[in-house]
Image: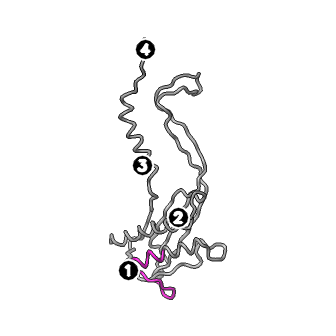
């Protein structure tokens, strides 16, 4: 008697869903989180300047990160009709960028059935199980704040967090600028919503 292995028909139905979910999870863009004061209306403000000293300049000099972030923020605000004015600004802009190592734990399903050792004797185990892996990744966080100069109160904040791999990034300055543009685009959307 010859036995011909056949695939479980349920696998054919679930496999495309699993692949689509995996591709979606791997391709998601970073999310921008914002918060604003109830009275914040971008149209009320016309001029801006940068808070001094900025948190990115802790060492007492202007870093490349600070220069790139200032340029990206200025470009975004000028594009929205704001004007850079150091003498009498309506708002002050502050930003902070930090990169830290975090442990990333990933669980993934094992195969439908396999010869594996799960604390019991070796054998064929059908069904779903999960394996865990962990590794350290760099996690970048950019926070941009808008402070009303008259009241010295924060009126808007935008934060973007994403995995950041400077070793794989041949132009890390461009990554920081892209993060700033994403945060400032959210401010632009808030301005058109009012």
Q: Position of residue 166 (x, y in %)?
A: 59, 60
Tell me which numbered mark, 4 or 3, is placed earlier along the sequence: 4
Residue 138 lies in the magenta stretch: no
User: Where on the picture, by quarter, is residue 187?
Assistant: bottom left
Q: Which SS class for mark 1?
A: helix
User: Where on the picture, by quarter, is residue 80?
Assistant: bottom left
Q: What residue lies at 39% left-to-right and 80% top-to-bottom?
A: 81
Tell me which numbered mark, 2 or 1, is placed earlier along the sequence: 1
Tell me which numbered mark, 3 or 2, is placed earlier along the sequence: 3
Tell me which numbered mark, 1 or 3, is placed earlier along the sequence: 3
Q: In front of the other: label 4 or label 1?
A: 4
Between the C-alphas of marks 4 and 3, the distance is 42 Å
Taking the view exactly as shown, the residue that stands out farthest to the right is 59
Q: What residue lies at 60% left-to-right and 47% top-to-bottom?
A: 135
Q: In front of the other: label 2 or label 1?
A: 2
Name the foreground residue: 122 vs 1: 1
Q: What residue lies at 57% left-to-right and 42% top-to-bottom?
A: 133
Q: Which residues are magenta?
A: 73-89
Instruction: Report which residue position mark 3 lands on.
Output: 24
Residue contact at pointers 1 and 3, CB within 8 angstroms: no
Q: Position of residue 34 (x, y in %)?
A: 44, 65
Q: In front of the other: label 1 or label 3?
A: 3
Q: Which mark is residue 44?
A: 1
Q: What residue lies at 42% left-to-right and 42% top-to-bottom?
A: 19
Instruction: Report which residue position mark 2 lands on.
Output: 175
Q: Position of residue 165 (x, y in %)?
A: 57, 57
Between the C-alphas of marks 1 and 3, the distance is 39 Å
Residue contact at pointers 4 and 1, CB within 8 angstroms: no
Q: Which mark is residue 2?
A: 4
Q: Is residue 102 left or right of residue 178?
A: right
Q: Which SS class for mark 2?
A: helix
């Amino acid at each position: 008697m010859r036995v011909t292995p056949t695939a479980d028909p349920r696998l054919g139905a679930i496999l495309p869903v699993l692949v689509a979910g995996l591709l979606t999870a791997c391709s998601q863009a970073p999310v921008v989180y914002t918060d604003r004061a109830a009275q914040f209306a971008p149209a009320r403000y016309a001029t801006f300047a940068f808070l001094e000293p900025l948190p990115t300049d802790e060492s007492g000099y202007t870093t490349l990160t600070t220069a790139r972030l200032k340029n990206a923020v200025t470009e975004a605000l000028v594009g929205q009709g704001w004007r850079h004015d150091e003498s009498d600004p309506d708002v002050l802009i502050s930003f902070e960028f930090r990169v830290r190592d975090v442990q990333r734990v990933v669980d993934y399903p094992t195969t439908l059935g396999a010869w594996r050792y799960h604390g019991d004797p070796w054998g064929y185990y059908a069904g779903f199980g999960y394996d865990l892996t962990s590794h350290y990744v760099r996690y970048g966080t950019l926070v941009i704040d808008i402070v009303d100069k008259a009241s010295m109160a924060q009126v808007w904040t935008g934060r973007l967090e994403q995995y950041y791999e400077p070793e794989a990034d041949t132009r890390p300055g461009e990554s920081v600028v892209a993060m700033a543009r994403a945060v400032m685009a959210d401010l632009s959307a808030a301005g058109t919503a009012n």
